[in-house]
Image (spheres, grey):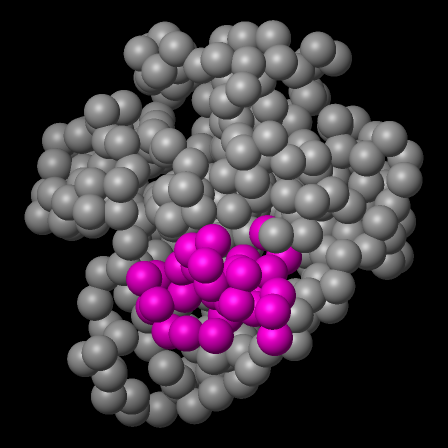
Amino acid sequence: MKRERIPSRPRGGHRLGEHRPDPALSRPSLPGRDSVAAAAMGAVTHLVAKVGGDANGLRALANLRSASVGVDTVITEASAPTGQVLVMVDPYGENSIAVIAGANALLSAQDVTDALTVLQLQAEDVILTSGEVPQPCLQAVAGNLPPGTQWVHHAAPAGTLPAWPEDHRPLLVVNEVKARQLTGAADARAAARAMAEGASGAVVTLGGDGALVVEEKRCQHLPAPAVSAVDTTGAGDVFCGALAAELTHGHPISRAATNATTAGAFAVTALGARGGLPRPRDLARMRAR
């Protein structure tokens, strides 16, 4: 991931003037940010993904190991480059993101099936997926989950959602903009309810306004702590990683989402992947303010 501070974000048809990169920001950041966030929140975490057989791939694996993320199920694809993300952050902390999937776009359903066989998931485990992998991979997840295993799906980037099997429907997580894109709903509450209809539940994040949680047709608003946003990049990934971690600790969805909302708020207060990753002690300090 490359992150740059810019004076303003370009609109369609516009080009920024000369920009001198900040060497403190213009460097690769941690991949699998949601996995890293889950590990930081105390969950035993393994990543299923593909990296390229290049220097970025080696760096990615080293970064993941240093963040206590298991990489035995990360496959090195020698024929493709490691995926890259370009992030532009304006003075208000808002961002524009371009993703080049690289090797991870080659992740297959068989790769996922093999990885889940190795991991031997138990009923108390949680699996977190995202829209960054091909849909056959999601179908492989649905076909290989043991009974009782919780499944959280981060529906980003926004796209067509697959038809989830009746007996293995995930908890969907997405921000308000993408929720409205996916459902065509006029507002966040309507979008959250619509998304929950075809899933086990839905969480719609609202940025500084917190999140909406829909389970069993009840819609609950969870406020977020007030913070000064420095960089909103990856806040959704941190939210999802923290949510999955809290579910592995046995918390119900509403409490897990409350803690994830606090984690997401913490994530926007610092630049860079490591600086914005909350630990349980960080959340405790935020709640005590």
| Residue most extreme to the front | 288
Q: In which quadrant will I find the N terminus?
A: bottom left
Q: Left of 154 or right of it: where is 198?
A: right
Question: In percent of the image, x 52 and y 67: which residue is there?
Answer: 285
Vertical placement of 206 versus 125: above or below? below
Residue 195 appears in the picture as rendered: no
Is residue 18 toward the left or the right of residue 150 in the image?
A: left
Q: Is residue 268 above or below residue 133?
A: below
Q: Nearer the viewer, residue 53 or 123?
A: 123
Q: Quadrant of the C terminus?
A: bottom right
Image position of 200 (left or right of 38): right
Residue at x-position 23% and y-position 37%? 51
Q: Which residue is at the front of the view, 202 or 134?
A: 202
Magenta region: 260-289
Residue 106 shows up from this direction? yes
Residue 210 percent across, percent down from the top left = 71, 62
Image side of residue 125 versus residue 205, left or right: left
Q: Position of residue 116 (x, y in %)?
A: 39, 14
Q: Position of residue 215 (x, y in %)?
A: 81, 35
Q: Among all residues in the image, which is located at the extreme left?
A: 55
Compared with 32, 141 (above or below) is above
Residue at 68%, 21% (x, y): give it.
169
Residue 37 inside the magenta-drawn segment: no
13 to 284, vertically: above or below: below
Q: Quadrant of residue 35?
A: top left
